[in-house]
Amino acid sequence: MARKQRTIKSPREVEGVGLHSGETVKLRIEPAAAGSGVIFQRTDLDDPPDIPARPDYLSTSSRRTALRVGPAEVGVVEHLLAACHGLGVDNLTVQLDGPEIPGLDGSALPFVALLKDAGIVDQKELRPELEVEEPIHLREGEAELLALPPSGEGMRIRYVPEFPVEIDPSPVHLRLQDGVFEKELAPARTFVLASEAEQLLAAGYGKGANRENTLILGGDEPGEMRLEREPTRHKILDLVGDLALLGADLHADIVAMRSGHSLNQALVKSLRAQLEARELGEGLVDRSGLEVGDVMKILPHRYPFLMVDRVVAVEGFRRAVGVKNVTINEAFFQGHWPQKPVLPGVLQLEAMAQLSGVLLQRKLEHTGKLVVLASMDKVRFRGTVVPGDQLRIEVETLRLNRSRGQVQGRTKVGRRVVAEALLSFAMIDA
């Protein structure tokens, strides 16, 4: 059963050292509107974009989860996201003045305490859900990750590790409900094999690691565990944090064998694609969406230049998904390659701009301002769109203030991205 979305009641701050960077970072969490998701902001950069906690913004990184928008990157987000996921905090703004989330004690427990101290409150909108209906099997070398239809409510995880003989290699099996995360996963610290420590330091990792925030496994002076099978529990904690990028409550049984961030991220991308496909459903509009008549009340465009047939989902003023059904009867096909009709790329950009107008106008509804396209950057056309295709339009707000907005736009046919662009808008008086 779907639950209400949640955020925090009041801001809180914490300061600490990044586990890998070794830099001291101040972090502040603030409430966010329903539909926002978790948004990271680098306050140490000039005019930084928002960095949404979504799979689209994953940055290639070893031994951690990092997100990037343009030059702005934030690393080691998994412990904070795991705390959000474990406590059901869906919408949050996270500001930090450095490139990496503070490691604190190497677990998610300090973030759990921070969120609870801030106060967790319900919001009006319902949290999206995704139930796995068909098995998903991923393999990378000897590591495997399997998502199965659920055997009960919520998410059940079984992790089978591979550790040296002196470290307990038995599996951990649990279901995430009734405070299980806070009790059995949140205290589990990040860890390192004593035999790998020097190699990792030489590669630039672990500059802020010490015996208080990192569990040493093996060697002459192994660390003392907080929990039974603490390293395996931390692997599950990382998995929970990576799955938070889905942006929905997941109902599934997860079986993991030796897996890490790379497979976790591949799984969440696959699940996100399923969630996006189900947003379109059978042509239905969810309670946040808009039929074409509602769209025309917001946009001034009309046939043949209205490029959004339907808005299937709107998440606050953060994200919107729309649809354009491409038919051979389109007026522009009479003159644009009539022998081999292809939807003009510039009209895909127009569709992104129109849907962005719908999204941003929700924020500006009572300000007397209009949204006007000012520029387009990083435009890429990656495939053709032909009659019979259903064009999925996605826009996500990266910046928004009283005078300007910036939106990441994409168009897709099925799971295939066919165009993308960074759109900037000016907010002008009506």
Image: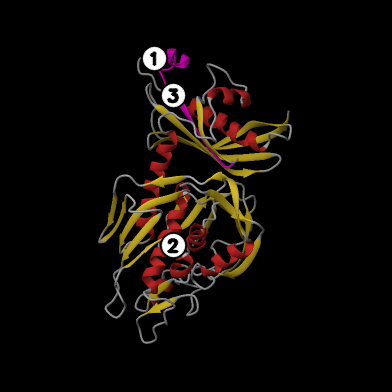
Q: Quadrant of the rendered structure where residue 218 is?
A: bottom left
Relative to 283, say whether 137 is above or below: below
Residue reaching furthest top? 334
Asked if disc 2 and disc 1 are in contact, CB closer than 8 Å, the reply is no
- Nearer to us of marks 1 and 3 is 3
For marks 2 and 1, give the CA distance. 50 Å
Q: Earlier in the sequence, mark 2 or mark 1?
A: 2
Q: Which mark is residue 338?
A: 1
Q: Is residue 334 magenta?
A: yes
Q: Residue at x 39, y 48 (%)?
A: 269
Q: Secondary structure at mark 2?
A: loop
Tell me which amino acid carries mark 3. Asn
Q: Earlier in the sequence, mark 3 or mark 2?
A: 2
Q: Is residue 80 visible?
A: yes
Q: Is residue 41 visible?
A: no
Q: Residue at x 57, y 52 (%)?
A: 6
Tell me which amino acid carries mark 2. Arg
Q: Which mark is residue 325?
A: 3
